[in-house]
Amino acid sequence: MHRARGFFFICAGLLMLSVAYNLGASSAVAQSTPTVFGIDMGGNSGMAVMGRTIYWLSESGTSSALPSVPGSSPIAAIGAQGLGSSGGAVAVLQNADVYRFDTVSSSWQRTGNILSSGPIPTTKSSWGEVKARFR
């Protein structure tokens, strides 16, 4: 009788644990600082992305934050184009939009979309045609 009661309590505890996990796991969020996910080191300066903001460290060791990159798609890549008096930063978004930061006007300019040429045309081939082409 005691074994059946113990088995019941173990099963009930596991059931409550799984229900609590399923209810709480979807609403639990981490409370930590944002993560740096893009870095570009060129020469004696460097850039890093945190959220939609690009931070730049100059050759002299001073750091500054550029204005937020426009657009709604996440930033996929960054690059520096001589962040001096006439240079700028480049940000490529996941939807292939390219933005360039001009230090003279202190604003982001959309320079285009990498995939603006449209879809790549393809032809349907059978497996036999593919094997014959590469023999």
Image (tube, rainbow, N blue to C red):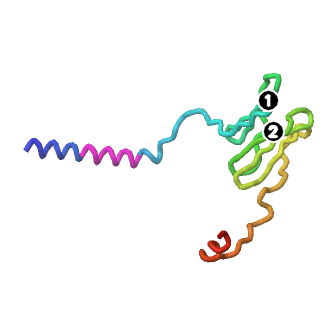
The mark total stands at 2
Q: Residue at x 74, y 67 (%)?
A: 120
Q: Residue at x 80, y 61 (%)?
A: 116
Range of residues picked out in magenta: 12-23
Q: Which residue is mark 2?
A: 80
At mark 1, the secondary structure is strand
Instruction: Kindly report the distance in space between the C-alpha atoms of the residues bearing marks 2 and 1.
Output: 9 Å
First of labels 2, 1 by sequence position? 1
Residue 64, disc: none
Q: Is residue 57 above or below residue 130?
A: above
Tell me if residue 20 is in the magenta stretch.
Answer: yes
Near mark 2 (Cα within 10 A), the count class, few <14, some 14-19 or many ≥20, is some
* In-front residue for pair 63/70: 63
Q: Which residue is mark 1?
A: 45
Q: Is residue 86 left or right of residue 90?
A: right
Residue 21 drawn at (x, y percent) = 38, 45
Q: Residue at x 62, y 36 (%)?
A: 35
Q: Is residue 34 left or right of residue 19?
A: right
Near mark 1 (Cα within 10 A), the count class, few <14, some 14-19 or many ≥20, is some
Task: Please say if the residues under marks 2 and 1 sit with CB atoms less than 8 Å apart.
Answer: yes
Residue 101 drawn at (x, y percent) = 84, 42
Q: Is residue 50 above or below residue 44?
A: below
Looking at the image, which residue sits at the far front?
135
